[in-house]
Image: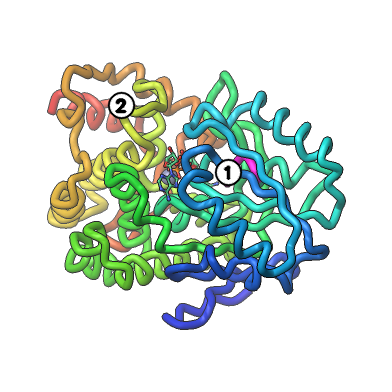
Amino acid sequence: VSAPKTSAAGPLRVELGARSYDILVGAGLLGEAGALMAPLLPSPRVAIVTDETVARLHLATLEASLTRARIGHESIAFAPGEATKEFGALAALLDALLEAKVERSTTILALGGGVVGDLAGFAASIALRGLPFIQLPTTLLAQVDSAVGGKTGINTRQGKNLVGSFYQPRLVLADIATLATLPRRELLAGYAEVVKYGLIRDADFFAWLEANGERLIAGDESLRRQAVLKSCAIKAAIVAADERESGERALLNLGHTFGHALEAETGFGPELLHGEAVALGMIMAFDLSVLLGLCPPEDAARARRHLAAMGLPTDLAHLPGRRFDPAALLDHMSRDKKVRDGKMIFVLARGIGRGIVADAVEPAQLRALLDRAVAA
Ligand SMILES: NC(=O)c1ccc[n+]([C@@H]2O[C@H](COP(=O)([O-])OP(=O)(O)OC[C@H]3O[C@@H](n4cnc5c(N)ncnc54)[C@H](O)[C@@H]3O)[C@@H](O)[C@H]2O)c1
Ligand SMILES: [Zn+2]
């Protein structure tokens, strides 16, 4: 297992032995997708899974490139949004695939954001006990996070992502040009995950984001490409070292335990997007790190300053009219998947670029932090 190459030109490789794969990042890749994936397909047939919004904007480009490469294709589009990541849609998708008589050699393509990627990946992992799978992420969040690393799944009544599988794609094609149609709010939410990589692992990348974040969000494709590549490189290295999250992969959850609690309270809907919740959660994690004497206050202030400058929420006052109850937030946090032997696993930081996994946070300290955050 070696670290991924981070050359600006070549593809990035996720090193997972027999399950290794390339991540290609560039503008216009969707138009070349057929030719790029052809060598990897066991047979020239694919089934595209997407959502209706992405289908309207980007499906024709993908289909044309598949046709040019003589790859047979059909597609199924779901309603956009988190509500699609559930048993009903999974059943409908499996039903459609089996009705279409997919074979073991038919490749599933996920064209869309994390919702489509997680749903399609899960279906690919169980249909006929596993079909080849390729990710074509079209949100910034999916390009830097959900399309890489092999976690798939759906939500249930009991919570998010509680049913799923580890199932790696054969290829990830991140077409930066698709981000041009993404609403700014969604783009910013994905940017929070980009910042996460700097905060947990790479102070230089964080400084680069401080310098370039604004132009990146404004539309600079070269900066977007560099940020996606760097984010994927950091995630790929962490996943290669710990595919099934027995240790350091937990670093990727910086801000997520707090964030999930906030999302649960706001209903996982448009009031608070996942990336926005992660931005808030990362600041809470830094504040807790300061409270525990682990992190210099200047570093927490700097993290907050950058997220705020980009237009991301950094304190709960961002949600006007919403009063959070610290006890309710604590309750959600204790139900999180990241609880081990009854102890909450927290990602904290010794500073910018220095994330750590901690499991000995005293409930009283956590409560103090939540009381303060809610009062802000
Ligand atoms: N598997 C993982 O490791 C992992 C990691 C992080 C997040 N996730 C999951 O990802 C999901 C969130 O992903 P997301 O933020 O991409 O959400 P999403 O898939 O719901 O996409 C967000 C919105 O953007 C629209 N959209 C997508 N691409 C577009 C484009 N190019 N132009 C215009 N609109 C576009 C979609 O239709 C949707 O309305 C959550 O379910 C989360 O649990 C998974
Ligand atoms: Zn996330």
Q: Is residue 169 left or right of residue 221?
A: right
Residue 224: which quarter of the image? bottom left
Label 1 residue near ligand 1, CB within 8 Å? no
Location of mark 1 (residue): 50
Task: Find the distance from the CA under tag 1 to the CA under tag 2.
Answer: 24 Å
Q: Residues within 10 Å of mark 1 (few under 14, many from 20)?
A: many
Q: Residues within 10 Å of mark 2 (few under 14, many from 20)?
A: few
Label 2 SS: loop
In percent of width and height, residue 82 lies at 49, 31
Q: Which residue is mark 2?
A: 271
**Apparent side of residue 141 relative to residue 37 in the rendered image (left or right):** left
| Residue type of the residue flagged with mark 1 | Thr
Task: Tell whether position 36 is magenta.
Answer: no
The quarter of the rendered structure image containing the C terminus is top left
Question: Which span is picked out in magenta?
Answer: 116-120
Residue closest to the eye, 34 or 214: 34
Q: Is residue 376 above or below residue 189?
A: above
Q: Which mark is in front, 1 or 2?
A: 1
**Residue 199 higher or lower than 157, as above or below:** below
Q: Amino acid at mark 2?
A: Glu
* Disc ID at residue 198: none
Quadrant housing residue 164? top right
Q: Magenta residues: mostly which secondary structure?
A: helix
Q: Residue at x 25, y 47 (%)?
A: 286
Examine the rendering and report whether any part of residue 148 can be seen. Answer: no
